[in-house]
Image (tube, rainbow, N blue to C red):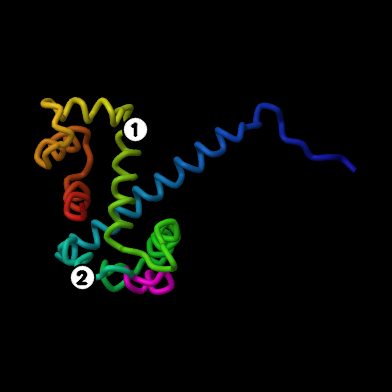
Amino acid sequence: RRRMERDPSMRVTHFQDMATDEQMFHRTLEAVIKVVVRHLNQTGTEITRVFSGDQGVPLAELQGWLRKRLNCTDDGVLSFLTDCAEEDAQDGIVCPKAFMQRLLLEKMIFTLMDRGISLRTLFRRLDHGSFGYVTEKRFRKVLEAHKIDASEIDFMLATI
């Protein structure tokens, strides 16, 4: 029997493998958020209403909750969001607002880092007076300057 081996030029390190997985996750996350934002914009649904009122949703019911609240019928999007929510679940309960905040923030961070922008440097540029916070207006202006879609910025800021 002849043993199949990978050509040495095709070998990847564990780190490269993990980096590729992370990039694939973030690309998928980016696409999912665009779909969610598009659904909300098409239906005229305000994000603040989507996530108001509910303190927690059982993980087992989250996909149905997202389908109803986001008015989204894309099973791939809903499955991806439900899988991501498992990380946020405590005792089988997910707070949808906190969960979406985490995903949006993660997406924004990846987008900036993908463009070579350090968060630390960005924050220092925005926090001229060293107050320890950044105004929404200034934050929005910088994100728009880095070509992050305005509807995604609205979506993120509305949930924070």
Kind of element beneath mark 2: loop
Q: Is residue 42 magenta?
A: no
- The local crowd at label 2, few if under 14, some if 14 to 19, many if 20 or more residues have their Cα within 10 Å, is few
Which residue is tagged 1?
113
- At a point 19% along the width and 67% down the height, the residue shown is 52
Q: Which quadrant of the view contains residue 40?
A: bottom left
Q: Which mark is residue 53?
A: 2
Tell me the quarter of the image containing the N terminus: top right
Q: Is residue 61 magenta?
A: yes
- At a point 29% along the width and 57% down the height, the residue shown is 98
Q: Which mark is residue 131?
A: none
Q: Which range of residues does the magenta coloring cover?
A: 57-66
Q: Which quadrant of the view contains residue 147?
A: top left
- The local crowd at label 1, few if under 14, some if 14 to 19, many if 20 or more residues have their Cα within 10 Å, is few
Q: Is residue 153 left or right of residue 112?
A: left
| Distance from the alpha carbon under mark 1 to that under mark 2 | 34 Å
Give residue 32's position: percent from left, percent from top: 35, 54
Q: Nearer the viewer, residue 131 or 148?
A: 131
Q: Which quadrant of the view contains residue 142?
A: top left
In terms of sequence position, does the residue under pointer 1 or pointer 2 come before the other?
2
